[in-house]
């Protein structure tokens, strides 16, 4: 496993107040706005972070089937918006590897029936939209043909004998809801708009829109409730942002298909309701019901706001209404300023409120806000920068200065060479070498950004207080400028709960592990996770204590490559009954002193990889002498 820089992360969110109202700025005020090249660069670094979680063998984003479809749509939006085409191969990889039949639990909790269909009708529709977008990007007919197959499958679940119409949410035909029908309208209208002389899918889209807008799911405030009760009346359930966004997107695509002027007032009513008081906005920030204090979004809810922004982008592009474009600028600004860590990971709560959650689902969701801020005609050039590692850990020896190597990675697009100056800055008393570096990049358009790296040597003086210390680097070329940072954690103690920001600096390689909240990191199947402890170079003994349960294998190493197994759970525990704090002596396995550190690594994996109950770690401490 090649270590990706973005496995080193910790949230350091600033508290930035945005001077813009809920919908439109006050008279004379200017909404927060990034210029085109900067907006493009921000989207690029966030998109690259998202794709670091793509699993090429199974060809998806681990553990969630429909979420993977939406994440790939988000990457498709990014490619369409910016002209970057680096991720077309991953789209095709997913198409070719995952179009077959799979048993329940392999890619989805449900059995996959082939052609990206399953008993979850809405999941099938998400994949239909993904392949329509792949067709738009490549003009390869196989993608559009797959979308047609999916639509034909879904068509079989349109049922006028219940509630006068609508598509069932599941194969058991137990529920009609907003998401399934919003997707149906959008997908069939998109098919029509790409198939000359079509009447079939246009008719389905019009039929679906007429039924949906009369169903009662759009309440008196213009907000979309989740679905219908058995008596075909609205259940009044939670107004989720993705249902609102899909309703907007469905109307917009049907409007493009028909040019029916009666559709747009309904779309505007849905949009205005979303950003009005009592809608989906809190203090200017798009906020999911589960984002509220004391609540937590599940893996589905983590992606809802991004879907809303996908179709809000369409709304702003279509109407050019300054209220809608101001809302785009506002969401992109709050995501970048408040909801981003040093590695360009984007969290669940766009306001940056704690506790926040960071994973590939939240990354895909917030990325949609950044994509929406990119101009419809992408800029001819852009410049971005990232750091590697973005969150190194230093455990200094007493009385000694410590050195850390940090690499600044610079990317650019454009038609002409760019001479880029990189200037680092560090806390008072620290030294960064070189103090200035100049590199030349020679891009050839937008499709394949070019890149180069600038190595930095950071000297941390003896006696530096424990905590986070930021080293920033600004890349400049003419009018283009982009800043990045490395948050260096100086620590003399190791003591953290998993699933928290405090865990992130120590998480050397997350692989395919997951964390569902505080004190809950686990690795199922053939996934694993690795902690790295860079003990001081003069360390003579060390140990690590893991509070762990279920079906685990614990291995240790001095170099992160050659592993020795020190514990294996041989019983198939699924309920945590074997939970205990277990201590492992790292002394025989510590690596040789290298620079300022002598590292020890601990890896946790699954002792029964076929049953889905891998090792779960709650808390970690480490000591040394």
Image (spheres, rainbow, N blue to C red):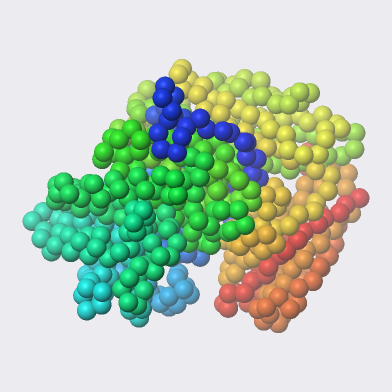
**Residue 401 appears in the figure:** no
Query: Up-down: is 472 above or below 243?
Result: above
- Quadrant of the snapshot with the N terminus: bottom right
Measuring from the top left, give residue 422's x and y in whole percent: 57, 23
Looking at the rendering, which quadrant does residue 449 occupy?
A: top left
Q: Quadrant of residue 233?
A: bottom left
Query: Is 201 left or right of 11, judged from the image as shown?
Result: left
Residue shown at 38%/43% (left/top)? 78
At horizontal 75% and vertical 77% (from top left) the residue drawn is 578
| Spot occupied by residue 94 in the image (x, y as percentages of width and height) | 38, 60
Q: Nearer the viewer, residue 595 or 336?
A: 336
Q: Which residue occupies 34% across, 46% down? A: 271
In the displayed structure, would residue 506 be above or below residue 428? Answer: below
x and y, in percent, of residue 259 in the image = 14, 47
- x and y percentages locating residue 213 in the rendered image: 25, 60
Q: Nearer the viewer, residue 392 or 279?
A: 279
* Rendered position, 237 above or below 608: above
């Amino acid at each position: 496993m090649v270590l990706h820089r973005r496995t080193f992360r910790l949230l350091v969110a600033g508290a930035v107040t945005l001077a813009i109202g809920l919908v439109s700025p006050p008279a004379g005020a200017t909404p927060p706005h990034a210029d085109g090249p900067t907006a493009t660069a921000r989207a690029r670094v966030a998109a690259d972070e998202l794709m670091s979680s793509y699993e090429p063998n199974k060809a998806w984003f681990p553990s969630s089937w429909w979420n993977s479809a939406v994440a790939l749509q988000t990457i498709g939006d990014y490619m369409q918006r910016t002209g970057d085409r680096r991720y077309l191969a991953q789209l095709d990889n997913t198409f070719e590897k995952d179009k077959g039949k799979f048993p329940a639990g392999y890619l989805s909790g449900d059995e996959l029936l082939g052609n990206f269909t399953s008993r979850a009708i809405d999941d099938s529709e998400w994949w239909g939209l993904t392949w329509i977008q792949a067709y738009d990007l490549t003009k390869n007919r196989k993608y559009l043909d797959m979308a047609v197959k999916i639509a034909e499958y879904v068509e079989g679940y349109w049922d006028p004998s219940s509630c006068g119409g609508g598509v069932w949410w599941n194969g058991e035909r137990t529920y009609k809801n907003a998401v399934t029908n919003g997707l149906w309208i959008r997908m069939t209208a998109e098919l029509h708009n790409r198939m000359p002389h079509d009447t079939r899918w246009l008719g389905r889209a019009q039929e679906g829109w007429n039924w949906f807008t009369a169903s009662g799911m759009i309440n008196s405030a213009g907000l979309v409730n989740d679905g219908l009760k058995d008596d075909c009346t609205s259940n009044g359930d939670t107004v989720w942002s993705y249902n609102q966004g899909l309703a907007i997107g469905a109307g917009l695509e049907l409007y493009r298909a028909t040019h029916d002027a009666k559709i747009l007032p309904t779309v505007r009513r849905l949009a205005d309701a979303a950003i009005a008081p009592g809608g989906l906005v809190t203090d200017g920030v798009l906020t999911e019901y589960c984002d509220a204090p004391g609540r937590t979004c599940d893996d589905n809810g983590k992606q809802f706001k991004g879907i809303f922004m996908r179709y809000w982008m369409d709304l702003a592009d279509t109407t050019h209404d300054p209220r809608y474009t101001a809302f785009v600028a506002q969401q992109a600004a709050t995501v970048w300023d408040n909801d981003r860590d040093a590695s360009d990971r984007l969290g669940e709560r766009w306001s940056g409120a704690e506790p926040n959650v960071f994973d590939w689902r939240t990354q895909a969701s917030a990325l949609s806000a950044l994509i929406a801020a990119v101009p419809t005609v992408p800029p001819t050039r852009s410049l971005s920068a990232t750091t590697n590692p973005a969150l190194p850990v230093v455990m200094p020896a007493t009385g000694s200065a410590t050195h850390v190597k940090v690499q600044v990675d610079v990317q650019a697009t454009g038609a002409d060479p760019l001479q880029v100056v990189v200037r680092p800055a560090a806390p008072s008393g620290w030294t960064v070498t070189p103090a200035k570096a100049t590199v030349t990049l020679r891009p050839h358009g937008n499709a394949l950004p070019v890149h180069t790296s600038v190595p930095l040597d950071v000297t941390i003086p003896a006696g530096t207080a424990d905590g986070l210390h930021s080293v920033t680097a600004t890349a400049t070329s003419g009018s283009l400028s982009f800043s990045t940072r490395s948050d260096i954690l100086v620590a003399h103690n190791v003591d953290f709960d998993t699933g928290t920001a405090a865990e992130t600096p120590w998480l050397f390689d997350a692989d395919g592990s997951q964390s569902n909240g505080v004190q809950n990191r686990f690795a199922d199947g053939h996934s694993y996770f690795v902690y790295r402890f860079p003990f001081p170079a003069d360390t003579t003994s060390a140990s690590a204590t893991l509070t762990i349960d279920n079906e685990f294998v614990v291995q240790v190493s001095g170099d992160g490559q050659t592993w020795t197994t020190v514990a294996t759970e041989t019983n198939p525990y699924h309920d945590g009954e074997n939970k205990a704090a277990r201590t492992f002596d790292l002394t025989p396995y510590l690596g040789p002193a290298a620079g300022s550190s002598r590292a020890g690594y601990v890896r946790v994996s699954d002792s029964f990889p076929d049953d889905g109950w891998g090792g779960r770690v709650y808390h970690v401490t480490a000591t040394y002498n």
